[in-house]
Amino acid sequence: MMMTCLLAALHQQGAHAQQQQQGQGFASLGPYEYAEMKVLCIRQDDADSSLDGNSNGATAAALSSASSLVAGRRRRRRLNFLGPLFSRQQQTTTAGNPASPSSSASLPCSEPDARLYVPRLTPRTARADADDAEQPAQMPLVAYIHPLFGRDLEEWIEANMPMINFLNSRGMLVLVSTQTKHEGLPRGEYALDTFQDSAIHLMQALEHVDRRSRGVHPKFGEDDWLRGKISRYAVAGYSVGGAMASWLAAESLKSPETRAAKGLPSELPPMSAAVSLGPTVGRANAPNGAREIYERLRHRVPHMLIAGTDDNMGGVDGIDVLNRNNNATRVYVLYRDATHCWIMYPFASECGSGPIEWYVASQQQAASRQAVAAFLQLYLKDDAEAAPLIWEKKLRDVSTIPIEAMYVENP
């Protein structure tokens, strides 16, 4: 009897170790690494195209006006002294962190407002520009919506480089907006179009790269490096960007005519997955009516919803609201003791005011990267290894920090 119990215990221990090993694969960097940063001029290029008679759902005058507005804005820069610290925790290559936007040798356009981070398959010990480095034939693309508040988009992107690097390491292109009409705002309630501006700009960027991938953008020829490159699309976001990610996903499944009638890009490609980290959907009965829009959202895009039990800035309420979308598969993950700090923002966003708190925050961010990688690998790459972590909820057994609750709900 004792021997039977011992063998059973050893078997259980071995099975748990196997699960840990399987899940930890998503807690570490994948086989790709950052290769290069492509600077894009979405509103400028597409305004030029619409002047040629190929309108993308917005007038050339409106696009040119928006470009002039953001190009003329005075840029603020603050020292992000924690960015290198937490990037080094995840970076294991000799290639180093991606160059900052200001270090680009040359810009392909005069009014850049978006950026595409591109991975290549290369040995972990090799330089990113090694002769044997290559890009896969096709890659999925993840569009990331950053918050509007506190600091400008360049600073949010810099702080979010651990996630961008991580997605690149999984062989995913990452698309971000770098200039919009509204950014760096004081926290507060604003008109709905202010909140939606960053998402609409990213819609325009998605339409732009999709037209290039399909070879139908009139400004780019057959030798365009993006031609035939993108396999599937996903959208992710944090805080108000996490709420907007759900809205963008819903709009992506509507007809081109429906979007065009609302002044949205008609050729927006459909999203295959959506991720919302600590989404803030607004308070009930607010004048801008944002919350009511999220409460009514119904779409079929598989959706990962992430928040922490100690989030006092609306993240838990946000995932509960978005979880009402019973038309889609929802993966609901609530981390124990985690706060709103899914992108490092010292002294704000509940990230704390000292090294110990910043270290704890970095651990919850690492856990979110593990979950997001598994979810996107499943829905963008049909990765069989990721399936049990999501569908069988085995992520709870291998998460780098405890998960208080995890649900997978299907339509």
Image (tube, rainbow, N blue to C red):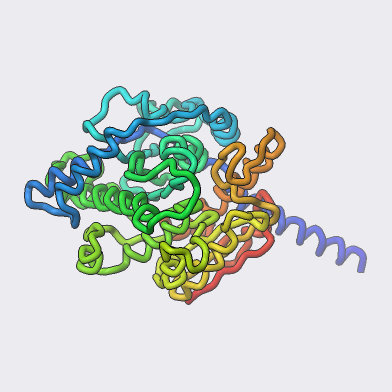
Relative image position of residue 252 (x, y in whole percent):
32, 63
Can residue 283 be seen? yes
Can residue 25 be seen? no
Q: Nearer the viewer, residue 72 or 378?
A: 72
Q: Residue at x 20, y 40 (%)?
A: 44
Instruction: Note whether 241 is above or below 160 in the view shown.
Output: below
In the picture provided, is 141 more to the left or to the right than 72? right
Relative image position of residue 197 (x, y in whole percent):
34, 51
Q: Residue furthest right?
A: 2
- Number of numbered labels in the structure image: 0
In the picture provided, is 132 more to the left or to the right than 359? left
Q: Nearer the viewer, residue 350 or 171?
A: 350
Q: Residue at x 56, y 47 (%)?
A: 342
Task: Point out the image quarter for the N terminus.
Answer: bottom right
Instruction: Note whether 247 is above or below 132 in the view shown.
Output: below
The answer to which image quadrant residue 278 occupies is bottom right
Q: Residue at x 43, y 46 (%)?
A: 148
In the picture provided, is 297 more to the left or to the right than 266? right
In the picture provided, is 204 more to the left or to the right than 391? left
Relative image position of residue 193 (x, y in whole percent):
34, 56
Q: Residue at x 59, y 30 (%)?
A: 85
Relative image position of residue 339 (x, y in whole percent):
64, 51
